[in-house]
Image (cartoon, rainbow, N blue to C red):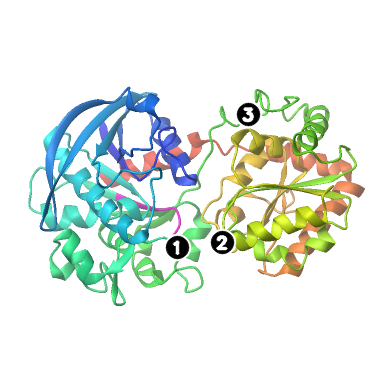
Amino acid sequence: MRKILYAASECAPFIKTGGLGSVLGSLPQELDPAGYDVRVVIPAYECIEEKWKKEMKIIATFPVWLGWRELSATVKTLDYNGVKFYFLENNYYFCGDSPYGDLGADVEKFCFFCKAAVDMLAFLKFRPDLIHCHDWQSAMIPPMLKGFHGDDPFYQSMKTIMTIHNLRFQGITGIDHMKDLTGLPDWMFGFEYLGHYDCASMLKGGIAFADKVTTVSKTYAEEIQTAEYGEGLEGILSWRKKDLSGIVNGIDYDMYNPAKDENLDQTYSYRTFAKGRPVDKLGLQKAAGLPQGENYFTMGIVSRLTDQKGFDLFMDTIGEILNLPAQLFILGGGQPQYEAFFRKCQELYPDQVYLQTNYNDQMAKKIYGGCDLILMPSRFEPCGLCQLMSLRYGAVPLVRKTGGLKDTVALYGEDDRPTGFGFEDYDGQAFLGAVLEAYQVYKDQPQDWEEIIRRGMKKNFSWKSSAAKYQRMYDHLLQ
């Protein structure tokens, strides 16, 4: 029985702000329980819902030395869907109404989390064969294992995997500050390890000291070894390329299932979407308060409104896009300039634009069920989940050819079995051209359009296939 511990800053259903929480909420449960003892450790945030807190049981309290600071952590646990979860409680670090805050405070908070997660194992007498760390918040676990427990028989043979969900976020602070926080030896802050120019990068430390490094798509694994996408870490990623691989994320096919989704006005499958989706288009328009009609070409955005997601490409193209008999449904908030831009579009095109900045799962599923096209013109995209959900619901994705978008959407005009549309150059006119091409096929080639929908709905991007790839990696590493 392989013992696997996942370490991360969030995990659905307990705490989730984005894709990381979704991954941790699904992947551990997909591993074969006959072959793997799977456990997860996350912080015990004050903002976790009370219903979960009531189920947690305290099993240990122990001291934690963070540099020169003597602190303490309490371990709480509960079992959920066959997986044991550990929650590390410290009322100073994990208080407040959000899991994240100021970066400076977060660096210290997650250094504490990493140290407590490592120390917890000895107090619980749980000795995992492998610790799978996710993103910068858990990235100090591999260097702490090496720096503090390199000769300790209890820890010595533990393997580690560092998974990068988004390289842009690294947990960067001053080298002296990181030395003070962690108490790690000076040699670990060399440029080939934690040192990042005149700073220290937590994520770089994880990449340097983990036994394997993964990211969330094959293309992104290649892209991050280049200066354009490497965020300053392309050197160490190229150095570790033999140990670097990409495995695409999945989605929960029970949670995202148009044949059973109660949020839809009409459920459907890949066999019945031609009858079901027109009903859901009208239902979406009604829910959004826009004019109802099947003649509209409905386009959706379900996303954080940030630079990464490519929303500057709309600035010079929105007029031509909405010159079509089209409606645009935007769900998600983010950077003020993009919220203001789409709010202005809503004022100028009140019958064509709907904006909701507070994410709502019910509205998201209505958009997937009722939109003809889902727009994802990302500047970069490690994996992306929105395109997987849109394929599942028969909303055709339009993507930029980058990262996981390139790996999961077969493009019209490039593949003889297309499941979506796309463009390569990060350019407004290239984006507009792809939108117009999609509309032309929708309007003039309805049989081709239906075949694109059907083919996408029959694709399998469930967690089962991705989990099998992780299992093979675990087995190979632990042989």
Query: Could you tell me which residue is drawn at 16 percent across and 56 percent down?
Result: 146
Height in image: 300 above or below 81? below
Mark 2 lies on a secondary structure that is: helix
Q: Residue at x 36, y 60 (%)?
A: 103
Q: Residue 168: give its label.
A: 1
Q: Say whether disc 3 or disc 1 marks the residue closer to the N-terminus.
A: 1
Q: Is the residue marked by circle 2 packed among few (<14), some (14-19), or many (20+) residues within 10 Å? A: some
Residue under label 2? 308
Magenta region: which residues? Answer: 161-168
**Mark nearer the viewer, 2 or 3:** 2
| Label annotation for residue 257 | 3
Q: Are marks 2 and 1 in contact (CB under 8 Å)?
A: yes
Q: Name the residue rendered at 72%, 39% in the picture.
A: 455
Q: Amino acid at mark 2?
A: Gln
Which residue occupies the extreme bottom position in the image?
198
The residues tagged by marks 3 and 1 sit, at their Cα atoms, a distance apart of: 32 Å
Q: Secondary structure at mark 1?
A: loop
Please name the residue shown 84% across and 50% down the image: 326
Name the quadrant containing residue 121: top left
Task: Look at the picture and state if 60 lies above or below 154.
Answer: above
